[in-house]
Amino acid sequence: MFARSVVVGQGYCARMQTSSDDAGAVPVEPTPAAQLTGRCLCGSVTYELTGAPFATVVCHCDHCQRQSGGAFSVNLLALGEQLDIAGELQTYEETDEQGDTVYVRRRFCGSCGSPIVSELVQAGGTVAVKAGSLDDRSTVLPTVEVWCVDRQPWVSLPGMAVSLERESM
Ligand SMILES: [Zn+2]
Ligand SMILES: [Zn+2]
């Protein structure tokens, strides 16, 4: 999977704020982990993501283009246990080219169709939360892009520390 060391210290970690009430005090607890919230377009699915994602990844793959209706998806990679979902999701299972191994479960709201999360089945419990569903998207800062082999010719993104030709998402 993705090299975590490349992205540690960037994105959410660097943007977490400390309370001004404690200015000058010696911190005895680590800074509380960020908690992010999100929802689908119609609001029947909501979620909380606890703790910092370990990477923020743009995926240019053909399937993400089709699912999103856009040129790429933006994904917060985290462990499934960090994500608490309320509401009904439907699931589309993607299989490999032979059709016998599920490698992504794309989960979306059955009412409005918003993609919420992809479960990366063969990546040890890693999930890819669709960043466009966050309530506050202003802190999203992708630093990795994958499936550049499918990248549209007009797309050129700034700030990419890692660009991979392929890699499942
Ligand atoms: Zn919905
Ligand atoms: Zn993709």
Image (cartoon, rainbow, N blue to C red):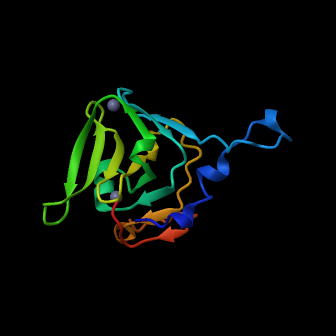
75 vs 19, nearest the viewer = 19
Q: Quadrant of the N terminus?
A: bottom left
Q: Residue at x 62, y 51 (%)?
A: 13
Which x, y percent locates residue 56? 50, 55
For this orientation, the residue located farthest to the right is 24
Quarter of the figure with residue 152: bottom left
Give whichever of 11, 157 is nearer the camera.
Answer: 11
Position of the C terminus, as image quadrant, is bottom left
For residue 82, what is the image quadrant? Answer: top left
Residue 79 x %, y %: 42, 49
Q: Nearer the viewer, residue 131 or 25?
A: 25
| 66 horizontally vs 50: left or right | left
> Viewed as shown, does residue 140 lie left or right of 75?
right
Residue under the image location 13 percent in, 66 percent down: 98
Residue 117 lies, with reference to residue 102, above or below; the image says: above
Quarter of the rendered structure image containing ligand 1: top left
The quarter holding residue 154 reads bottom left
